[in-house]
Image (tube, helix red, strand yellow):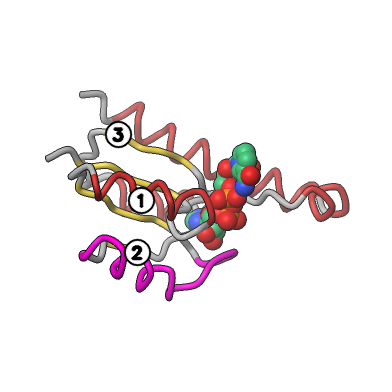
Amino acid sequence: MKKILISGGLGYIGSHTVVELIDRNYDVTIIDDLSNSEEKVLDGIESICGQRPEWIDLDLSDKSKSDDYLKNQNFDGIIHFAAFKAVGESVENPLKYYRNNLFSLLNVMSYLETHKN
Ligand SMILES: NC(=O)c1ccc[n+]([C@@H]2O[C@H](COP(=O)([O-])OP(=O)(O)OC[C@H]3O[C@@H](n4cnc5c(N)ncnc54)[C@H](O)[C@@H]3O)[C@@H](O)[C@H]2O)c1
């Protein structure tokens, strides 16, 4: 069974992706810090799929915490949805968006760089 990490997997697009992957027999792990979602989304996923995916409450923009978790993992694939996306707020506070979206992406890419299968 392929092991897939869905970052931002409790968000809008991520949670639908999780349901589709579980239905196709993937072993799904979610990383989500609930910055724009709620833990109860897991209940919805469980009621649709009949199983509750593993959820890691982690801010992926935090390099040290991300490395600590990711270094021991062996994912076959990652789909990266963890990001801020509100256009208005991104114009008012661009650094908040750069920090979250770029640092999170770079931390995921660092993992990929050191875990080439
Ligand atoms: N919604 C759309 O129509 C749409 C269309 C095209 C592209 N996208 C892109 O897809 C991605 C996801 O969009 P969405 O609509 O599902 O957004 P969303 O806000 O519903 O989901 C994003 C999830 O990521 C989590 N998250 C954010 N920063 C995080 C961090 N640092 N660490 C861990 N978790 C974090 C949030 O808690 C949330 O659950 C975004 O990059 C967005 O720009 C969305």
* Mark-to-mark CA distance, 3 and 2: 20 Å
**Numbered disc in front, either 1 or 3:** 1
N-term-proximal mark, 1 vs 3 = 1
Q: Secondary structure at mark 3?
A: strand
| Label 3 crowd (10 A; few <14 / some 14-19 / many >=20) | some
Quarter of the image with the C terminus in it: top left
Q: Is residue 102 left or right of residue 32?
A: right
* Mark-to-mark CA distance, 1 and 3: 13 Å
Front in this rendered view, residue 11 or 70 = 11
| Label 1 crowd (10 A; few <14 / some 14-19 / many >=20) | many
Residue 102 showing in the rendered view: no
**Numbered disc in front, either 3 or 2:** 2
Looking at the picture, how far across and down is residue 33, in whole percent? Answer: 48, 64
According to the picture, the residue beneath numbered tag 1 turns out to be: 18
Residue 98 sits above or below residue 58 on the image: above
Mark number, residue 95: none
According to the picture, the residue beneath numbered tag 3 turns out to be: 77
Q: Are marks 1 and 3 in contact (CB under 8 Å)?
A: no
Under mark 1, the amino acid is Val
Q: Quadrant of residue 31?
A: bottom left
Q: Secondary structure at mark 1?
A: helix
Q: Is residue 109 left or right of residue 91?
A: left
N-term-proximal mark, 3 vs 2 = 2
Residue 36 showing in the rendered view: yes
Under mark 2, the amino acid is Ile
According to the picture, the residue beneath numbered tag 2 turns out to be: 45
Looking at the picture, how far across and down is residue 35, in whole percent? Answer: 58, 65
Q: Are marks 2 and 1 in contact (CB under 8 Å)?
A: yes
Q: Which residues are magenta?
A: 34-50
Q: Residue at x 43, y 51 (%)?
A: 16
